[in-house]
Amino acid sequence: MTDVAVVGGGPAGLSATLFTAKNGLDTVVFDTDKTWMHKAHLYNYLGVRSLAGDEFMAIARGQTEDRGAELREEKVTAVEATDGGFTVSTEDGDHDVRYVVLATGTNKTFAEALGCEKNDNDTIDVDLSMETSVEGVYATGALIRDQEWQAIISAGDGGAAALDILSKEKGENYHDFDTPGDVPSLRDEEA
């Protein structure tokens, strides 16, 4: 059984993926590469002077794969609750998972099918850690924010979801904070 399935590979989904995979959770991303980032140019993203959305996505995908995530270009057809977690169905088969992070832009199909509660403005209701009313299901980005569709906000949503999942897995509040000594390439340079 996979620990985390992320449905959607934009900034929110890849941010969640980066944290969970980096910290040892078996993580798979299902994505059809239709992110809004292909139309974007990052000029207001903290830490980035100016970068094409396509280039940002290539870097983010590579970064998540480098940390151990599996990226699959597959269309998700259903997400269903099971006794031990969830089943994510794609055109290529079913995948049993413990947690689901929905990063599907404005597409609420899976959240609605799972019975996630909505807010008055028709967005998916989440707590501060992005968990929905369905335990183990997280919603991010445009699913939860009416017209607040910024890549950096969505990435933060994905990070919040991942830290909540990691906290549950570790049994205590978990903070992913790296120092130069934690980074393999920097350690190698200092040696």
Image (cartoon, rainbow, N blue to C red):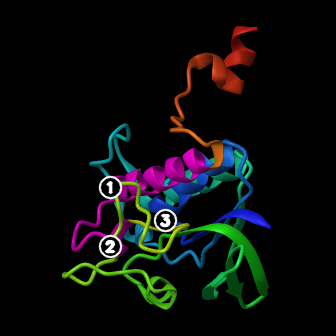
Q: 34 or 141: which is nearer to us? A: 141
Pick the quarter of the image with the C terminus.
top right
Q: Earlier in the sequence, mark 3 or mark 2?
A: 3
Query: What is the C-alpha distance between the residues marked 3 and 2?
Result: 20 Å
Percent coordinates x, y for residue 143 in the rendering:
36, 75
Q: Earlier in the sequence, mark 3 or mark 1?
A: 3
Pick the quarter of the image with the N terminus.
bottom right
Residue appearing at x 46%, y 59% in the figure: 11
Q: Is residue 158 magenta?
A: yes
Q: Residues within 10 Å of mark 2 (few under 14, many from 20)?
A: many
Front tag of 1 and 2:
2
Q: Which residue is mark 3?
A: 10
Front tag of 3 and 1:
1
Query: What is the C-alpha distance between the residues marked 3 and 1?
Result: 12 Å
Residue stretch rendered in magenta on the structure? 141-168
Q: Residues within 10 Å of mark 3 (few under 14, many from 20)?
A: many
- The kind of residue tagged 2 is Asp
